[in-house]
Amino acid sequence: MLEHIRLKRGLNIPITGEALCKVSKRVVPTLIALKPTDFRGVTPKLLVKEGDSVIPGTPIFADKKHPEIVFCSPCKGSVSEIVRGDKRKLLAITIKPNNDAQVQSYDIPKLETSDRQEVIDILLKHGLWPCIKQRPYGIIADPGVTPKSIFVSCMNTAPLAANLEFSLQNNFENLQAGVNVLSKLTKGGIHFSLDADNFAGTDFHKLTGVIYHSFYGPHPAGNVGVQINHISPINKGETVWTIDLFLLVAIGNLFRTGTYDMSRTVAVAGPAAVNPSYVKCLPGTSMSDLSEYFGSDKDVRVISGDILTGETIGKEGFLGFYNNLITVLPEGNYYEMFGWVKPFRLNKFSFSHSYFSWLMPKKKYNMDTNTNGGERAFVVSDVYSKVLPMDIYPVYLFKAILAENIERMEELGIYEVIEEDVALCEFVCPSKIDIQSIVSKGIDIMLKEME
Amino acid sequence: MNNLRKFTDKIKPAFEKGGKLGFLHSTFEAFESFLFVPDTVTKRGTHVKDSVDLKRVMTVVMIALVPCILFGMWNIGYQHNLAVNGNMGFWAIVWYGFLKILPLYLVSYIVGLGIEFTSAQIKGHEVNEGYLVSGMIIPLIIPVTTPLWMLAIAVAFAVIIGKEVFGGTGMNIWNPALLARAFLFFAYPSHMSGDKIWTAGAAGVDGFTGATPLSQTSDGLSSLLSNYSVSDMFFGFIPGSVGETSKLAIILGAIFLIYTGVGSWKIMLSCIAGALSVGFIGNLCAPSEMSALAIPAYYQLLMGGFAFGAVFMATDPVSAAQTETGKWIYGFLIGALAIIIRLFNPGYPEGMMLAILLMNTAAPLIDYYVVNSNIKRRLQRAKTV
């Protein structure tokens, strides 16, 4: 039986530049980077040196605290540079690919006859373990823990998000194989959340071995954290795992074919994107290989991820490990005379009814990065819960974090949220408070407490 | 526009840190962001942000207050005209009201914003917009005859003790405008009560009584109705504080606040519900028709500062309850308390003010219990699994 869950609170941000459902480029990479900074809480230990040759699946670095968790090269080539920042912090390892078509295949034991530990060891050894994240905290899962259950979201409601149905077409067998792998990892069931509006036409609801739920509602209904909160909320001491659908495909593929293939279909979208559409590329692909999508304007921001949670990488940056979306935004570094007092401002979007955008629900807006006002103290504090469809009192949680009161944070639900779940609170905040940074600080405090 | 921008850019360096006028940085910033939406871009977190900011929110409240101000201006002149048995025309009446209200606004804004700018300067913060609204409300909730020096002291008290000592807008416990009113009431009671204070230029008129409807409730319904009809009280042709008399103007403001979502309809509605419930209970218990308890409950909504308080003061998002459940309780108790005070201390015009200030104080407590029930739910959930 499919359980329908209807969420009312939330907001779909109407931004222009949605990617057309066509693959307009298959990137032949000229440079690939692995960024340890993509992985929260990981202290990298380098396993290669400059000049080493690598193939897809060669470990590049490991986590110092969990040396068994390794991060692998997605391509064949040679290590070209180790990039370090302040205090010799490891920022990136760049790889110069030599693009020959030869496929390297590994010897993977049959899934049916493997036990849980063997499956975990394969995932660890072949660099696919980092695909699996844990809640609370949204960090890479601890291989030593058995999770209560595993959650996968089959709907992507974030602004301009990649269309999963399109970007994962022809991957049914990989998905089923991935599900079979996950079923070795937990006894609590694998929960798939479908888009209630549109799942009948997709492959996602034909898988066996999963428990289906369907969600209806605006963003963040597609966030796995929100879905967990409505299906089986996380209590103190519990751990669940989550995985992105496109990373599950890579896991399935490894067990089916023995190849480490991280290539993915990535949406390039946003108001400043030229020819918004999809490209096929690897994680860590250099944006210089995609320059034709960004135009010649200097005041453009290239983001790996969506406009709410993504990271600014710039025109020379690299696609993040967990991202299948590149958003291109115009910078908002301009002044607008009497902007706040102009009665109409029909080209500005606001969740609040003090503008008129709510009367035109179909209209899309060319948004930019202007903050639209200065930072203030919490004043209009009931607006957050209108975009956070969870049984949580957001302001009280944020204030508990600011006060570094761990007990209160636990009581108010720090285990149930990560940054992306409160991103809309930050978007609508009239006081322009960096709410994701607050939650991030809260998670850091909790992680420190665990050590 | 471009020239203004160029000029601003030219003088800007002098106000930056280390510039000649660097100590005036906050002041410069306040004026610059008043003229222009700043060019700041998002640095971390969400890359785009909603177009609403606190300036916009405050502007909405100020627009909502406009009908009350305009009507209040007219009514000052109208009441004066009645008192002196004059025959002033419409524009003469409005002009008279304008001349009376202008000094109140000048004092309110010069003193209040002066303190806001100074304290922002000292702390090195940006100037907060909060006082734009408080400063607009204060002249509306005091008698028009209030001496300006008293107003100045009250405003200073409200801004310094009511707001800045707690850390500025967003940190205050009580509604600053009401605090100014309360200060006046307790510091200078003789100037805040009586029948003469509500009408400008009437002090020397022989035989004049400018009693407000509320002050006549102690003599029962018939005495009240002999002076003012229900429609007078609804439309506002009665003596009273500048902004509180016209319920029509207040309703216009309320509609705008609810439409924009800036004022909480839950608080307004529950406030009215609270007042009516206590009013009805009063009606049931009334010993005789002459008793103040016999005043029909809905009259309470039309008299004194109740409506203005419910729409513009109880809904202040900073000092009100912040949880949705809490708002229902908070509003209901304000309405109920205000009418309890009125019924048992007949004609006491400060009921609404004291009720709101008391519930401002209790709002964190209400929220505490609402939030705690959420915590209990979470603990319960952990146990049952």
Image (cartoon, coloured by chain):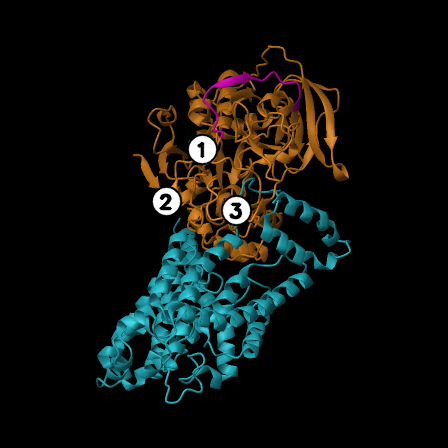
Residue A42 visible in this rendered orientation of the protein = yes
Report how many numbered discs are placed on residues in the image. 3
What residue is disc 1 on?
A156
Secondary structure found at label 2? loop
Question: Of the residues under marks 2 and 3, which one precedes in the sequence?
Answer: 2
Secondary structure found at label 3? helix
In the rendered image, which quarter is residue B71 located in? bottom left
The answer to whether marks 2 and 3 sit on the same chain is yes
What residue is disc 2 on?
A8
Q: Is residue A167 magenta?
A: no
Secondary structure found at label 1? loop
Question: Of the residues under marks 1 and 2, which one precedes in the sequence?
Answer: 2
Instruction: Say few, some or many: other residues with alpha carbon within 10 Å of mark 2 (under 14 / 14 to 19 / 20 or more).
Output: some
Q: Chain of mark 2?
A: A
The colour of chain A is orange
Residue B79, percent from left and from top: 38, 76
Q: CA distance from mark 3 to mark 1?
A: 19 Å
Q: Quadrant of the N terminus of chain A?
A: top left
| Near-viewer residue (A324 or B102) | B102
**Image height of B270 relative to A147, above or below:** below
The chain coloured cyan in the image: B
Q: Which residue is drawn at the image coordinates 47% and 50% (left, top)?
A: A384
| Residue type at numbered disc 1 | Asn
Q: Is residue A26 magenta?
A: yes
Assign the magenta stretch its main secondary structure. loop
Seen in the image, is B310 located left or right of residue A70? left
Residue B307, percent from left and from top: 36, 68
The disc at residue A147 is none
Residue B127, percent from left and from top: 61, 59
| Residue type at numbered disc 2 | Lys
